[in-house]
Image: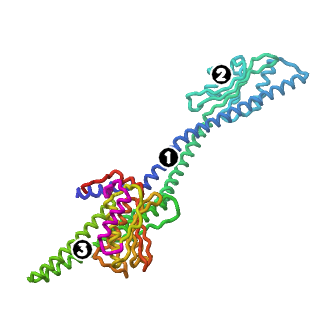
Amino acid sequence: MNKGAEVLETGRSNKLQDFLWEARSRILACYIIIILIFVAFSIPAFRQLLFSRINERVQEDLHEQMDRFQEFAEAQQIDLEESSESGSDEVFQEFLFEEFLSRQLPEDDMFLIALRDGERYQSSPKALPEPLRADSPLINYLANAEQTLEGEQDFPDPEIDSVLYVAEPVEIDGESEWVFVVAHTTAGERAEAVEATLVIVEVMLVAVLLASILAWVVAGRVLAPLRLLLGTARTISESDLNLRIPVQGSGELAELATTFNSMLDRLQAAFVSQRSFIDDAGHELRTPITIIQGHLELMSDDPEEQQETLSLVNDELERMSRFVEDLLLLAKAERPDFLMLETVHVSVLTQALYTKAKGLANRDWRLEGEAKGQLVCDRQRITQAVMNLTQNAVQHTHENAIIALGSSRHKNNIRFWVRDTGEGITLDNQEKIFERFARIANRSRSSEGAGLGLSIVRAIAEAHGGQVELFSRPGIGSTFTLVIPLDPPSNRLSHEQNPNR
């Protein structure tokens, strides 16, 4: 029971791990982290911005209130000068502050204070917070003002927070015994700003939650081709390579799907080619084995018949040996050490090829040209390729037919050609004949080969970085041209000639 519980717990843990490592989960996690970092930095900045705006507005209110007092004082001074009544300056000053303060109804947290000889004379409202009372250090500092003072002072009391103030000495007849102070505590406004910030935080968290849900859904839709690709990859097997991913729209994912489908096309072509290769190779090997087995089973005690059977068996075994060697050669063609490069004189090589070709059969052999200069190539592989071409020409020509060989230089290539006056090849079949185990309909063959000769020629040419060209007209003949670049491929340069090969 405990073991079952452990297995269940392990399964849940693995599922959670898989979920956390999903691309969608990681994208969402990064998205949320980025937003939260943005929120973490933006909220304090927003709070500080609100505090700055509050201070600016309060300062404007303080100056506006001070301007009102100055306008009121100037108006009262003019009225006093125009009036026939006279009184002492002291009486006028008392009247000025009492009259002004009685007419004002300050907004919340704003205080108007009249100071006389360093002491509070009157204020509006009457009740003042601790930092603005007569014996406070701030009031003592402002009471001695000889010029306009303004600023801000912080206090530990959360109900005060800080005090913004403007203090203006009042001169009447050149004497300054009074100081008018306009002050404002910021605790109320800042508390409202903090509440607004908290509301914004709540709204942003809800927005982050909703955005995360939306991002999860959108990420799922965006990554849907990846999941489809994964499902397709899991479904594909060697026996079923027909599935493809639907390509929708454009962009990276569409390009990925297109690339994946192209890879599947190449894999399918490779598997089909491999399967066809195995089938053809099996067929080519099965035929001589069947012949050998049949003749051995039917062989009698007659010595002459036994000798004929042994001769036939040896022929079939030699054919199988050549076939296996050809298969091995084609398999090695992609390897870097397939070629053993050396510098050869093209004219000398051409003459050697012509000499070897003349011994193949009774034909009208001709040497049509010899290129001058040197070529870096694998002499043995080039010889093998040209001999395959001449053998092919012999197979498809009659006795005394013309077969011509030659070489020439064209731009940066050396061209070795074999021309015959045989039956020719139709245009449809000209590409097929270079395929492995090619069987061309309506073409006579006097050889028991497996159809690998021209495949070997092409493999040798491509290993040198070149190609095989074919020009053929039915009833006139064919010309096979081996095109070899003067500059060998870079991946073959490190493999020098091995004389013991």
Q: Which residue is mark 3?
A: 285
Looking at the rendering, in which quadrant would you find the C terminus? bottom left
Number of marks in the rendered image:
3
Q: Nearer the viewer, residue 242 or 164?
A: 242
Q: Position of residue 270 (x, y in %)?
A: 36, 67
Residue 482 visible here: no
- Label 3 CA crowd tier, 10 Å (few <14, some 14–19, many 20+): some
Q: Residue at x 65, y 28 (%)?
A: 128
Specify how the rendered protein is coloured: rainbow
Amino acid type, mark 2:
Ile
In magenta, the rendered stretch is 336-364
Amino acid type, mark 3:
Leu
Q: Which residue is mark 2?
A: 139
Q: Which of the two discs, 2 and 1, labels the residue nearer the N terminus? A: 1
Instruction: Indicate the quadrant where residue 166 lies.
Output: top right
- C-beta proximity under 8 Å, tags 2 and 1: no
Separation of marks 3 and 1 at Cα, in angstroms: 67 Å
Q: Is residue 324 left or right of residue 442?
A: left
Q: Nearer the viewer, residue 33 or 485?
A: 485
The residue mark sitting in front, 2 or 1, is 1
SS state under label 1: helix
Q: Nearer the viewer, residue 487 or 59?
A: 487
Separation of marks 3 and 2 at Cα, in angstroms: 115 Å
Instruction: Indicate the quadrant where residue 419 lies.
Output: bottom left
